[in-house]
Image: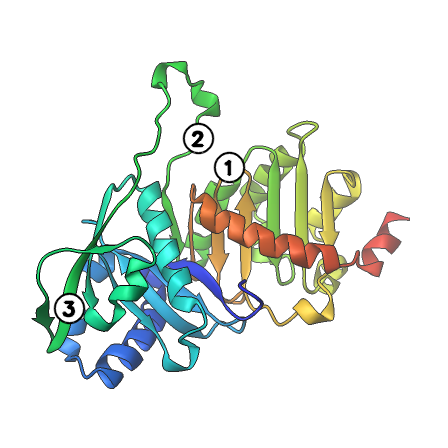
């Protein structure tokens, strides 16, 4: 969350197409009169996308990074321009390119936006040209080469995980993606959930993966923020049981009233992975087994809410 006003999240076309299209339709098709036939292309299905959303989930900005290293379709709706949304979107895409090992980025920038992209290090290349009736300029950015460690000296069991997209559209997809994220963790988990979602967190394999983290040793820590604990207590959720048996490892808190407007849910692990849903009551999710910039951003938000959160009285009574 940026100043509590909006947040940035990776997006997947198969999951987030409606929201991506909503922003691009408003900015490009309606405002700039770009023909709809020119707006959508085959790159959308394969590109890395990013969305800016308000806390209630409304999409306000977007951009994409193609497989060939082109950044484009950068758009922010008019009411949110000049508030840092574009910079946050661009920063996310540049970081994403770095995790993919890309060394050179290119874009076709509308000429009025050249100073905006130049602030992030892009430089003009070649002559101005027309695209969809609008003056454009090719701009390029060289990324620093990341230092690689000798493979022969890395213990395979401790090697950093590789970036791998996670996405879900159905209940079974969400269970599989959550299980993959949990199994990729080592000692710590952060879970933000509406009501401990029995259809997800009561699944035997998911519970076992969480239990393995809880029993991983002295560094083990599982923090769970639950907006509504009544159902979990009433129905005897097994994560509540685990928290009662391992109170020094598994901690549950309820956000205070000021944080209850958050509509999403997510899971983070300690190896750079995350799985995020914009709406906790839906199955659609997007994430990655290794994308520390987004995981760290979500963890910072989690920690802020955690510091304000309280231990639910009903859980304290259970502990007596």
Dot 2 surroundings within 10 Å: few (below 14), some, or many (20 or more)? few
Spatial CA span between label 3 and label 2:
40 Å
Expressed as whole percent of the image width and height from the top left, the position of residue 92 reads: 39, 55
Q: Secondary structure at mark 3?
A: strand
Q: Are marks 3 and 2 in contact (CB under 8 Å)?
A: no
Where residue 247 sits, quadrant-wise, is top right
Q: Secondary structure at mark 1?
A: loop
Residue at which label 2 appears: 160
Question: Which residue is nearer to you in this view: 176 or 39?
Answer: 39
Q: Secondary structure at mark 2?
A: loop
Expressed as whole percent of the image width and height from the top left, the position of residue 160 reads: 44, 30
> Measuring 60% from the left and 43% from the top, which residue is drawn there?
189
Dot 1 surroundings within 10 Å: few (below 14), some, or many (20 or more)? many
Relative horizontal placement of residue 306, taking residue 129 as reference (left or right): right
Depth check, mark 3 against mark 2: the one in front is 3
Q: Are marks 1 and 2 in contact (CB under 8 Å)?
A: yes
Spatial CA span between label 1 and label 2:
7 Å
For marks 1 and 2, the one nearer the N-term is 2
Expressed as whole percent of the image width and height from the top left, the position of residue 231 reads: 71, 63
Residue at which label 3 appears: 136
Judging from the image, the colouring scheme is rainbow
Relative horizontal placement of residue 10, taking residue 275 as reference (left or right): left
Is 319 placed above or below 234 here? above
Question: Which residue is nearer to you in this view: 62 or 264?
Answer: 62
């Amino acid at each position: 969350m940026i100043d509590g006003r909006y947040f940035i999240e990776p997006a997947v076309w198969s999951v987030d197409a409606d929201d991506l299209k909503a922003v691009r339709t408003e900015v490009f098709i309606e405002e700039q009169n770009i023909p709809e036939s020119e707006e959508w292309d085959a790159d959308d299905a394969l590109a890395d996308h990013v969305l800016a959303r308000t806390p209630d989930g409304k999409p306000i900005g977007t951009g994409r990074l193609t497989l060939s290293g082109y950044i484009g379709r950068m758009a922010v709706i008019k009411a949110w321009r000049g508030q840092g949304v574009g910079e946050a979107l661009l920063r996310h895409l540049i970081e994403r390119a770095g995790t993919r090992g890309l060394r050179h980025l290119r874009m076709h920038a509308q000429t009025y936006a050249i100073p905006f992209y130049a602030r992030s290090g892009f430089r003009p290349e070649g002559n101005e040209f027309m695209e969809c009736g609008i003056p454009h300029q090719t701009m390029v950015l060289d990324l620093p080469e990341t230092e690689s460690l000798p493979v022969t000296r890395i213990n395979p069991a401790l090697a950093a995980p590789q970036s791998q997209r996670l996405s879900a559209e159905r209940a079974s997809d969400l269970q599989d993606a959550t299980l993959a994220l949990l199994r990729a963790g080592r000692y710590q988990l952060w879970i933000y959930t509406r009501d401990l979602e029995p259809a997800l967190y009561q699944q035997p394999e998911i519970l076992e993966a969480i239990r393995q983290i809880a029993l991983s040793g002295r560094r083990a820590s599982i923090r769970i923020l639950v907006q509504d604990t009544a159902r979990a207590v009433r129905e005897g959720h097994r994560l509540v049981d685990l928290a009662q048996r391992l109170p020094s490892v598994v901690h549950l808190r309820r956000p205070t009233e000021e944080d209850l407007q958050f509509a999403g849910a997510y899971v983070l692990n300690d190896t750079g992975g995350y799985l995020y849903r914009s709406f906790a009551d839906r199955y659609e999710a997007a994430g990655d087994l290794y994308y520390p910039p987004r995981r760290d951003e979500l963890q910072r938000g989690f920690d802020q809410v955690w510091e304000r959160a309280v231990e639910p009285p009903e859980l304290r009574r259970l502990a007596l």
